[in-house]
Image (cartoon, grey):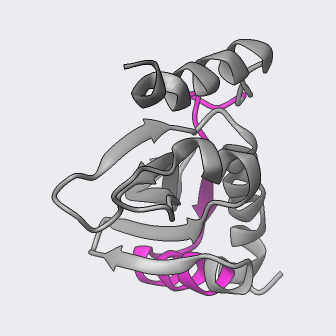
Amino acid sequence: MWRSHSGLVAVLCLAACTRPVTFATPSGSPETVIYGGTRAKVTNAIIARSLATGWTLHTTSEYQVVTEKPMEGTAAALMASRYDTHPVYRATYVLVDTRDRGLDGVRVVATVVAVTNPGSAFERTTDFTRSKAGQEVQALLYQLGRDVLGG
């Protein structure tokens, strides 16, 4: 019994020792607004920037982009399962047209989860939005404006 719960106990102990990241955004998650861009341009910029920083494209639709990146180090060891020892981070970007102060733009809100047993019927997710992975996604979002508008 103890052996089957040791990973969970380790994750909880580590979580208790680390301070969650806070984002000064309306959603409390990584986000940005790209003024003067379109959803298509922002989608392409997210995909290009993600590929350039080690993420792979998982799925895409008109309003959403989902990318993945293999977990490494201690986090990967703690999140692995007997079924699949290769957990991944999964970033989901939701794109919404917005109008603020007379300017049209695209609001992008992101979440990050750790996925155990990715691609299987036994997928299990753990929210990592307020972690180092969330900070990495916020940094990617800061770059989007320049990517989309060429600045």
Q: Position of residue 86 (x, y in %)?
A: 51, 65
Quarter occupied by the C terminus: bottom right
Q: Give the answer, above or below, for where 92 lies relative to 42.
A: above
Q: Nearer the viewer, residue 70 or 93?
A: 70
Q: Nearer the viewer, residue 5 or 108?
A: 5
Q: Residue furthest top?
A: 16
Residue 87 in view here: yes
Q: Quadrant of residue 46?
A: bottom right
Q: Nearer the viewer, residue 107 or 128?
A: 128
Left or right: where does residue 77 sit relative to residue 145?
Answer: left
| Residue at (28% x, 52% y) in the render | 123
Question: What are the residue bounds of the magenta stretch?
Answer: 24-49
Q: Give the answer, above or below, for where 73 lies relative to 140.
A: above
| Residue at (42% x, 52% y) in the render | 115
| Residue at (64% x, 32% y) in the render | 130
Q: Is residue 23 magenta?
A: no
Quarter occupied by the N terminus: top left
Q: Residue furthest left?
A: 121
Q: Give the answer, above or below, for where 91 lies relative to 42.
A: above
| Residue at (62% x, 53% y) in the render | 76
Residue 27 in view here: no
Q: Position of residue 32 (x, y in %)?
A: 63, 51
- Give the total number of marks visible in the rendering: 0
Left or right: where does residue 47 sit relative to residue 130?
Answer: left
Q: Position of residue 39 (x, y in %)?
A: 42, 73
Q: Is residue 47 magenta?
A: yes
Q: Position of residue 30 (x, y in %)?
A: 62, 43
